[in-house]
Image (cartoon, coloured by chain):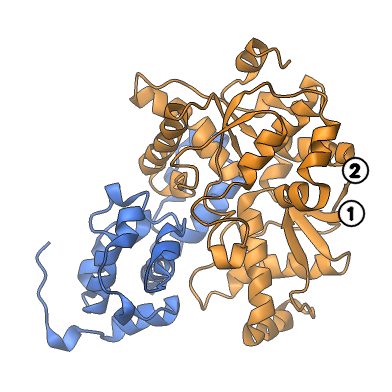
Chain colours: A blue, B orange
Amino acid sequence: MKVELNRQRVHNDFTKKVELISGQNLFACYQCGNCTAGCPVSFAMEIGPHEAIRYTLLGLEEEVLRVNTFWLCASCLQCTSRCPKGIDIARVMDALRAVVLRKKEREDAIRVSELPEELLERAPQIVFVSGFRKFLS
Amino acid sequence: MEYLYFPGCTLNTKAKNFDLTARTCASHLGFQMKELSNWTCCGATFPLATDNLMALLPPSRILANAREEGTALTTLCAVCFNVLKRTNRLLQDDGEKREKINNFIEKHYEGDLRIVHYLEILKQDVGFPRIKEKLKKELGGLRIGAYYGCMLLRPFKEMAFDDKERPTLFEEFLEALGAKAVDFPYKTECCGSFQSVGSPDVATECARKILESAVKSGAEMIVSTCPMCTFNIDHKQMDIKAKYLHFREVPVLYFTQLLGLALGLETKALGFELNFVDPLPLLKERALL
């Protein structure tokens, strides 16, 4: 992905919003990549969690909100428990989700009406309750 | 010993076998589980956005109501356990949020319940030696992989359940039942969780890695503590099989079903009909039924 860096955008309002919602200081990240290495779903991510943090810190709002990284996060907290700088990365991923879901368009990340009938029959409630909390605005 | 018991939404329906076997085993082992008189779904996720107080209301209300009925609360589902324990911790530590939440739910709860998982009761309060005395059937070296998943353990400072990377409590439990606990590298890896509704293929892949890791390490069966994990690693074996032709099914049981089996419960009381991969052939082959 081609990104254009601009000094004015570093740690901009978007970054501050993510920091506020997640309660994390993104400057603490030194890009070791431990989060991405331990992430069970990083194989399907367009950029790793550590990259998503860097993009956010650089104020690249459009670029980072376009990728699937934070939507794929399963909140398993592997990254959180392994971060040598004590950043709760899962909270950062959830904050990125929140930034999108809280926009005034209130656009959901999944279409409930399109979920396959077979899944609705088989899956336990717990999957839907937690899934809807993570994907619906 | 009496514990208040929070079943949670899934144990009342799709994971009825988990609930029933746990209750029966408790009475065999001499402790009571008193179901809360008034409970709702816990929300099934601990909110990670720090300003999302709304998602803390259901677990807070459950805890506040429970405190009026007793002092120790147990639960079986790893997700419920995680949500209740973390919320309880937050209500203890964060005075500002506690006040806001209490004002909203019109309670005065201080976070002073003891939240304890059923496995912890077995180890700390009943004790594995006493369970051994009560066994009707030793599991005859059945090779079982103990799958912890994430929610029992992480975040480890708040959950304080066992070692964060190399927990052993579940294995000790299996050994106490006379099984051979198989250590496997993916035992604390995520099952894909709620991605089953977001990105089902990704969740299936997570499940496949866990199952193959356990089987490669020699497991003939896997035990779990969570209906969400169980859906992903048991029911989704159908999807894995459709994609990977060499994949061989492996039975996944709730740990209380295995405990019930060892305590000599009748087969029909173990609720195997709700398990997706049928464990009966393996159990019969080992003369455990």
**Residue A6 position by quadrant:** bottom left
Which class describes the residues within 10 Å of circle 2: few (<14), some (14-19), or many (20+)?
A: few
- In the displayed structure, would residue A127 be above or below residue A31? above
User: Residue A107's spot in the image, x, y percent?
Assistant: 38, 63
Q: Pick out the residue farthest to the front.
A: B129
Nearer the observer, A63 or B30 = B30
Image position, residue B97 (x, y; %): 63, 83
* Direction from residue B71 to residue A86 in the image, left or right: left
Tag 2, which chain?
B
Mark closest to the chain's N terminus, 1 or 2: 1
Say if residue B27 shows up in the picture: yes
Mark 1–mark 2 contact, CB under 8 Å? no
Q: Nearer the viewer, residue B163 or B69?
A: B163
Q: In this view, does B288 lie to the left or right of B245?
A: right
Q: Which residue position is annotated with label 1?
A: B2
User: Which of the pair B81/A64 is nearer the observer?
Assistant: B81
Q: Residues within 10 Å of mark 1 (few under 14, many from 20)?
A: some
Return the mark for residue A21.
Answer: none
Q: What residue type is labelled 1?
A: Glu
Kind of element beneath mark 1? strand
Looking at the figure, which quarter contains the C terminus of chain B? Answer: top right
Element type at mark 2: loop
Distance Cα–Cα, label 1 vs label 2: 9 Å
- The subunit letter for the residue under badge 1 reads B
Query: In the figure, B111 relative to A109: above or below?
Result: below
Residue B89 found in image quarter? bottom right
Give percent across and percent down for residue B95.
Answer: 66, 86
The spot of residue B118 in percent (x, y) is 74, 49
Reading the image, the residue beneath label 2 is B30
Taking the spot 68% from the left edge, 56% from the top edge, the residue there is B41
